[in-house]
Amino acid sequence: MRRSVFDEDHEAFRATLRDFIAKEVVPVHHEWEEQGHPPRDFYRKLGDLGVLGVQVPEEFGGAGQTSFKFAAVATEETTRAGVSFGNYSVHTNLILPYLMAYANEEQKQRWLPGFASGALMTAIAMTEPGTGSDLANIRTRAELSPDGTHYVLNGAKTFITGGVLADLVLVVARTAPYDPENRRAGLSILCVESRSEGFAVGRKLQKIGLKASDTAELSFTDVKVPARNLLGEEGAGFSYLSHNLPQERLTIALGGAATAAAALRFATDYVRERTVFGKPVAHFQNTKFVLAECATEVTAAQLMADRALELHDECGLTVADAAKAKLFCTETAGRVIDKCLQLHGGYGYITEYPIARLYADTRVSRIYGGTSEVMKTIIAKSLGL
């Protein structure tokens, strides 16, 4: 079906990105996967291209766009090429909304110009060993000094995307004693500079997919965080985290729809070229039927993702709608990619083929940002169940 969600500006941005990806990313992406992340100066290149600052206000060096559709284009184009921009999505799609909504003017002046240029890369540290999705159980502590000038931060975080290269990490910590009657109270977000004494990057976690995006353990031992680096109000951290969930889940839904579409294209191209018993694999009825099923599911996922994208730009994407989009698009991607890999036969299991990388990379989309089971719980609650 013809898509109508993007206009001429989005398509011009797409053309620029496609050319950049072909020249700057595809030839070296395998090196990034071996290293575990892109070279640090790659983010400078993204900044120079204007990709990191699309939604950063013009006064801070960005383009000042309010539409999230440019981020959707970036997701589609990287996926189309079977590559990634490392931790770009976490930096721009997850963290920027926190800075835009809760940073004061002085903080924006300090951080946003570097954010847009790639001079300052960010990460967010929520998950702790043993907490998983239960953010109200966070144990990392931050105590305000007697003179009120700084916090002393102690604790550990895990599964931190971008933690290896980040210059500024938004750390969720408990700034008030744990209250079993109100577990969500007392959480705050502190913006911690990675060069701070006592800040340490621990293990670089080895994943089955997303190998060009680093994931690390972080620890904080008596880290002094200036009080002026408190994001928003003390104790309001849990509500801040909830505020950005629709966009985070929309980002994952868009990725699901894009990866399903990419898998369909990879498989269609492959079966036309690959011959079995003297005939192209595309000749067989089973191949045609499988790809017909996949094409239908891809269209359905794109329609849901596009509508959710439009609602988000209109400030009308609800928590339940975002959960529906994430659930459907990621589950669809899992089914479609599995079928498309099967059509590749043994080559589908070889990582030099993009379908194999998609298979490994996509599995986590049903886990992070809230598992599929959590999405179902949210949707059920919206039904009054």
Image (cartoon, rainbow, N blue to C red):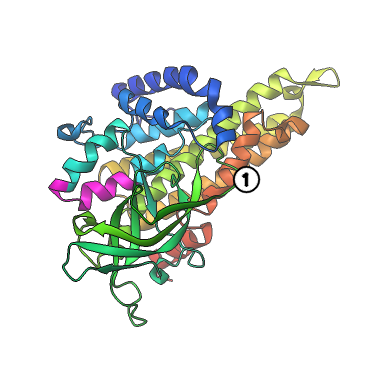
The answer to whether residue 272 is left or right of residue 64 is: right
- Does 87 sit above or below residue 20? below
Query: Residue at label 1?
Result: 208
Residue found farthest to the bottom: 181
Q: Nearer the viewer, residue 185 or 170?
A: 170
Answer left or right for 385 relative to 344. Answer: left
Which is the main secondary structure of the residues drawn in magenta? helix
Question: Relative to 25, is 381 above or below?
Answer: below
Number of residue marks: 1
Which amino acid is tagged 1? Ile
Is 37 contained in the magenta span? no
Q: Which residues are magenta?
A: 95-106
Viewer-proximal residue among 245 and 56: 56
- Is 53 displayed left or right of 203 in the figure? left
Residue 1 in view here: no
Residue at the image point whose x is 28% and y is 71% from the top: 186
Judge whether 59 appears above or below 244 on screen: above
| Position of the C terminus by quadrant | bottom left
> Where's residue 369, x and y in %?
45, 53
Quadrant position of residue 150: bottom left
